[in-house]
Image (cartoon, rainbow, N blue to C red):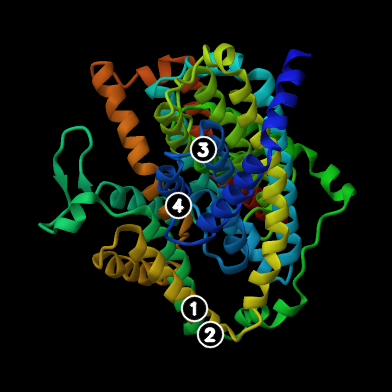
Amino acid sequence: MEVLANLATGFGHLFTPVNFLVLWVGLVLGMLVAVLPGLTLVMGVVLALPFTYKMGVSPALILLTAMYVSGTYGGAITAILFRIPGEPMDVPLLWDGYEMTRRGEAALALGWSLVAALFGGLVSAVVMVLLSKPVAGLALAFSTPEFFAIVFFGLASVVTLSGSSLVNSLISLCLGLLIATVGVDSIYGAERFTFGEPFLQDGIEFLLVMVGAYGIGEVLTRMSTGFAGEAGEAGGGAARFRTAFPTLAQMLGMKATFARGTATGIVVGVVPGAGATVSAFVAYGLESQYGKNRDKLGKGSAEGIVAAKSAATASVGGALVPLLAMGIPGSGATAIILAAFLLHGIQPGPQVFVSSPDLVYTVFATVFLGVVGMCILGFFAIRPLCKVLEAPEAIVSAFVVVFCFVGAFAARNNLSDLYVISAFGVLGYLFERFDFPIAPLVLGTILGPLAETNFMTTMVSFDNDWTIFFRRPLSGGILFLAFAGLAWPLVRATLKRVRAAREAHARAA
């Protein structure tokens, strides 16, 4: 009863005119930042932080939290419709959402993404309110070996599901990991693969790889076909696009996927530093291995959309748990929210539940209402974006290229980034042409630095004893699942060959 009373107080604070206005401003800003390629959710929250200096602590936290919530959904629209993920967490939506768009089912794909975001967000908000202290205590058991194991599991999962050729997937992933090493080593400070070029010392931004390979690469692929065939389906059929929600029976038939994705998002979101991107990839990997229709993933399956999007949105509640209960940010965006706390003289942690419970529960109320508001905005933002597809695809593609270049330049105001994004556009086209999956390349670039940092930190902390990854129960269990996922395609292929040989021998006899 005390929790409900505190939550009611939080909603009371949220519905004051100023706070309610700030909430909707944050939702709109978060949606816009997530939709724009080249801008990240964390970047948007960082840019908004200076505007909170003169605000009271409640409006400041409401603004940043609302941006965090809506930012986990906006990129799904461009990922599904244009094959341009607004955020790294939206990359898994390309594999099924964009395939549904090419089949003329964009409206249904968007409907599934809204339902998944609403379900994952609300369930994680309930968990956040009820289990904040116990779950935050559990998160303290994680150290760098567990962080590395989770990232490795995400990398291994995407390899197993990203194409018909495991070899091509591994080559793509290794190239992404190689790209991630460019720059200055964060542990020893040594330059790697910079070739004397100053702009490479800061590394190659994953945004350039992601937007170039997916956005410009797709345009080049369409150009090579003369914007014919499937391209016409995406453009000419846009007038028929509308938001189509799945039926209740369809949603009940996918209840296991909703549960897996949401649970994965909450658990992974609690791990500091993991965030929505890792949650989405891990959830998609789990669905590809244990889902009822796992063989259909990557071919326009709603299960892939539900798994990734419910996990990404559910990670918000998970990431806020260690922030509020222990003062440990669970993601890049919550690290900025932590800065807002500190700028207003408040240290998050167990004591804040005693000294400022109204503030904590105002944040909780913001998550609840923010999830609902995010879905309302998502519903009405879909139709204007669909209208863009009514234009001839050559014109739409030209705008996509301009949008990609503007977003890439705005990220760092560096002209060299335009050459980099062009190079990865060509690479994306070549990958499509020769049947190499792009997803492992992008994921390796995104998660490579995180994997390297946690691996090297573990080696330094445990005297170069690599067995620590397997001797610790949590990291050992996660790595076992990762290696099992890597081995399963090989085992399955071997079993198929043996079965085919037996059938051939039986026919010959």
Tag nearer the camera, 1 or 3: 3
Judging by the rendered image, the residue that carries numbered circle 1 is 399
Judging by the rendered image, the residue that carries numbered circle 3 is 60
**Disc 1 to disc 2: CB gap under 8 Å:** yes
Callout 3 crowding tier (Cα within 10 Å): few <14, some 14–19, many ≥20: many
**Would residue 225 appear left or right of 301 to someone viewing this image?**
left
- The residue shown at (64%, 70%) is 385
Q: Position of residue 117 (x, y in %)?
A: 68, 46
- Residue type at mark 2 is Ile
Tag nearer the camera, 3 or 2: 3
Q: CA distance from mark 2 to mark 4?
A: 26 Å
The residue lying toward the viewer, choosing from 185 and 301, is: 185
Q: Is residue 487 visible?
A: no
Judging by the rendered image, the residue that carries numbered circle 2 is 395
Task: Tell me which label, 1 or 3, sits earlier in the chain.
Answer: 3
Q: Position of residue 161 (x, y in %)?
A: 56, 50
**Disc 1 to disc 3: CB gap under 8 Å:** no
Task: Tell me which label, 2 or 4, sits earlier in the chain.
Answer: 4
